[in-house]
Image (spheres, grey):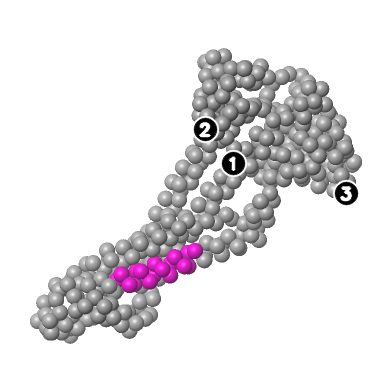
Amino acid sequence: MSLMYSIKIALDTLRANKLRSVLTMLGIIIGVSAVILMVAIMQGLSYNIKQQFNKMGSNLIIIVYEPPKDNTKGRKIDGFTMRDVKRIERDCPLVGAISPEMPLGNSVEAQSNGRNMLVNPIGVMPDYARLRNVPAAEGRFISEVDAASWSQVCVIGSKVKTTLFPDVNPIGQHVEVDGLILQVVGVAISKGRSFSGDTDINVYMPLTTVQKRLLGSDRVGAIYAQPVSTSMLDQAQEQVWQTLMQKYSDVPGIKVDTMAALLSSIQSVFMVFTIVLGSIAGLALLVGGIGIMNIMLVSVTERTREIGVRKAVGAKRRDILRQFLIESATLSGVGGLAGVIAGTLGSYALGYITTFIPQLADKQSGHKGLFIYVPPWIVIFAFVFSATVGIFFGMYPAVRASRLDPIQALRHE
């Protein structure tokens, strides 16, 4: 019996039992669709995380001090100061740019022309705009002159502009923040929400203005540094760490991280979740495979006499084995193909439906809804796996059919 003839018989058999074939494939379709949907959502979220990190600035070294809460005996410091910033500038030749910042805390009230709103005031230096990717959309950013003269100027976020200055050009206007009257010299580009919060309600002031006019100290909250080249990121990080340890060797809580390392850690977690959720969804594929085996066993029982007739007229064991394997592979293959189509369309349909949820909109990029990405590898993997499941679970019924004794099979009623 030729291969093409075996395929024809298998397809004829499946067409003769359309409803049973469709119901058998349903488990495979659901399993493949679920796998693709889960992976598409997780891959989209991973892409979104990467975009959020890009908003915060790339190739950055982040230097912070977070004293451990349970540290009662160890040495503590009040935090980093401008002396630490200058030490890094002096002793770390691999650091090309550095910018400290000093947040004044969330939810500080800002007022102007009878309007008010809660803002996040931050003291920054001129390099902050480049390092943190916060260029001015209107006007200018904080300058060296502003920092040197403790100028009472500020750059406001886009939401601050629309709330406090809805009808006028904000450049040159004045706003009161934490009791300090500031002149608006620029409006920062809209970036939406990120891990650091809603950046569009930030008010950026010269760091020296915050230190001299509000805090009375030269403390800084965090320090951002950039290596002289991207390839020197790890070496620059180590250099900064060694410089700080020379002064604070026994102080716990000093952290020197990079955006790349943080992103890699988060993406590793997402990959684990992708594998776990994909595996859970893949259980439906196994259930579908068991369904195929069950139906094929029923088919063997129903067609016992047919098998006996074929063997009696010369069909060999391999012909019977091949025929039943082709039937099970066809069920799983067609089901897998349908599942790939359903899963892909369902993923993008979910992305479209979520565009109507305002909380999922990214104002900077204009993207609405969930980020959905169906990687080619999951489509290929899901289809191949579904076909393999069909062959695996169809093997036992096929072997059982091929081993039937033709005499006993012909007596079967």
Q: Position of residue 204 (x, y in %)?
A: 75, 34
Q: Is residue 358 left or right of residue 44?
A: right
Q: Residue at x 48, y 46 (%)?
A: 270
How crowded pointer 2 is (Cα within 10 Å; few <14, some 14-19, many 20+) is rated as: few
Which callout, 3 or 2, points at the residue further toward the start of the chain?
3
Query: How packed is label 1: few (under 14 Cα within 10 Å), some, or many (20 or more)?
Result: some
Residue lying at the far right in this picture: please name it: 113
Q: Position of residue 33 (x, y in %)?
A: 45, 64
Label at residue 53: 1
Q: Does residue 334 belong to the magenta stretch?
A: yes
For the residues labelled 3 and 1, the Cα–Cα distance comes to 33 Å
Say what amino acid the circle numbered 2 marks: Ser
- To which residue does mark 2 refer? 231
Evaluate whether residue 250 shows in this view: yes
Find residue 76 and report its image quarter. Answer: top right
Q: Is residue 196 left or right of residue 168?
A: left
- Closer to the chain start, of discs 3 and 1, is 1
What residue is shown at x 62% (from left), y 17% (from top)? Answer: 90
**Residue 76 visible:** no
Q: Between marks 3 and 2, how big is the CA–CA gap?
A: 47 Å
The range drawn in magenta is: 328-344
Report helix, strand or loop for mark 3: loop
Q: Say which of marks 3 and 2 sits in front.
A: 2
Any mark on residue 167, and which?
3
What is the C-alpha distance between the residues marked 2 and 1? Answer: 18 Å
Crowding at dot 3, Cα within 10 Å, few <14 / some 14-19 / many 20+, comes out as few
SS category of the residue bearing label 2: helix
Tag 1 secondary structure: helix
Between 120 and 158, the one lying in front of the other is: 158
Q: Main secondary structure of the magenta part?
A: helix
Q: Residue at x 57, y 48 (%)?
A: 48
- In-image side of 187 versus 328 (left or right): right
